[in-house]
Amino acid sequence: MEIDSQATAENINRVQRRLKYEIGTLGSIESACDDLRQLAGFHTISADQAEGTLTVDYDAVLCGIDLIIEKLTKNGVSLGASRWNRIKLSYYRFVDQNLQENSKHTPHCCNRVSRR
């Protein structure tokens, strides 16, 4: 998967996450991938069965990590419960929330010289 490094209006909030999951059945991973592809703002997903990882690429403003986890658990895919995975998920939530809040913010500076 190749992601363009230029920040354009289309991919300015685009993030790539690597999620480790508990090894499950192939059918549950496939159905979860199909559900995720239908989400608004979702770009790509790839599963590595040997390592037990999912690489997801999505727009953080339209689709957050919590929605992705919800779709995965609905299809019977459970994420790894190690301390490192919990730390990564907390960081992903933090970054997604910041991107969502920053997208709603309107700048107030107009680059004028202040009055004196």
Image (cartoon, rainbow, N blue to C red):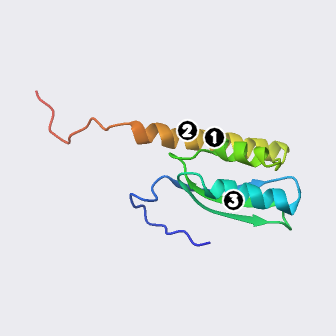
Tell me the CA gap for discs 2 and 1: 6 Å
Q: Which residue is mark 1?
A: 93
Looking at the image, the residue that sits furthest to the left is 116
Q: Which residue is mark 3?
A: 34
- Amino acid of disc 2: Gln
Image check: 78 left or right of 35? right
Q: Could you tell me which residue is drawn at 79 percent across and 58 percent down?
A: 29
- Amino acid of disc 3: Asp
Image check: 100 left or right of 83? left
Instruction: Give percent across and percent down for residue 108.
Output: 27, 35
Q: Which residue is mark 2?
A: 97
Which label number is shown at residue 5? Answer: none
- Tell which circle, 3 or 2, labels the residue nearer the N-terminal end: 3
Image check: 26 left or right of 35? right
Image check: 112 left or right of 109? left
Instruction: Give percent across and percent down for residue 103.
Output: 42, 42
Q: Quadrant of residue 66?
A: top right
Q: Mark 3 or 2, which is nearer the eye? A: 3
Which element type, helix, strand or loop, lies under badge 3?
A: helix
